[in-house]
Image (cartoon, rainbow, N blue to C red):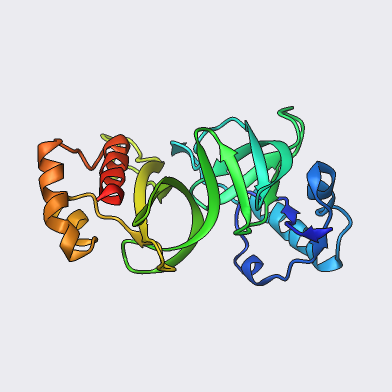
Amino acid sequence: MKKIIFILLAFFIAPTLQSQNLSTAPTGEAGLFGAAQGGSPMLNLVLMELRTNAKSRDLGETVGSPYSTENFVKSKIYYGDEPQGDFFIRYNALNSVIEMKKTDLPDEEAKRLYPDKKIKIKYLNKELRFTTYINKKNETKNGYLSQIASGSKYKLYHRLAVKYSEGKPAINSMVADIPSRFAHFEEYYYQKIGVDRIDFLPQKKGGFIKQFDKELRENIKIYLKEENINLDQEEDLIKAFNHINAM
């Protein structure tokens, strides 16, 4: 027995969930899914509330999706370094929610993976971890990041984000309604080794260079120019961080 996670049925986050206390639960597939069945009365009440919210919310006609992929993808879940089994995962990037099933059968109802910073999810070509970070507006947020580069000086993280824009009705019969829209975009974050803080990483050259120690900046500036680094490309960002860590 060890501290692990509760599985909750959900498509949307209940704001009060972050303050709930987690108790111990058995590991492995049976334990993960069993934790959401017949647990405490409070847990059952939360499950009912989430089911009601999911059924009652209607976004109407929309373009795009809150999910990174519409289908569930077979993925591995770890608690620390201990494997917990293979599950079928779908990531709701709009709400930072991991939905999971034991199989990819369409009639199996998805459950929500309760966020825990010790959980690692090998999903698609990245590893998702629930993390605290500082966003572009200098706000402290919790969500899923993927570490994509690391070295002696800095770590680089990727975040898939989704923005929801509400649609508007047509102003007259000559034009069409504007549907609601989910727009996908990517953000990058960095962490200086030895500092317990993950910050937003600007991708414009000037802002990018200013994030690093002063004694490194001139070398970084020369490297970006000589190697024709495009900071809007993830592959080039990784190259830049590998170079910085080797300096």
Q: Is residue 245 above or below residue 177?
A: below
Q: Position of residue 226 (x, y in %)?
A: 10, 38
In the picture, measured across the screen, residue 8 lies left or right of residue 31, that is left
Q: Position of residue 127 (x, y in %)?
A: 53, 43
In the picture, measured across the screen, residue 64 lies left or right of residue 70, that is left
**Residue at the location (65% across, 53% down)?**
80
Q: Quadrant of residue 229?
A: top left
Q: Position of residue 144 (x, y in %)?
A: 51, 52
Residue at the farthest top position? 105
**Residue at the location (65% across, 66% down)?**
17
The residue closer to the viewer here, 25 or 166, is: 25
Q: Position of residue 25 (x, y in %)?
A: 82, 58
Q: Is residue 10 above or below residue 127?
A: below
The residue closer to the viewer here, 211 or 158, is: 211
**Residue at the location (60% across, 53% down)?**
12
The residue closer to the viewer here, 67 or 208, is: 208
The residue closer to the viewer here, 17 or 117, is: 117
Residue at the farthest right position? 38
Q: Is residue 182 above or below residue 4?
A: above
**Residue at the location (60% across, 44% down)?**
121
In the picture, measured across the screen, residue 4 lies left or right of residue 140, that is right
Counting labels gives 0
In the picture, measured across the screen, residue 192 lies left or right of residue 14, that is left
Question: The N terminus appears in which quarter of the rendering?
Answer: bottom right
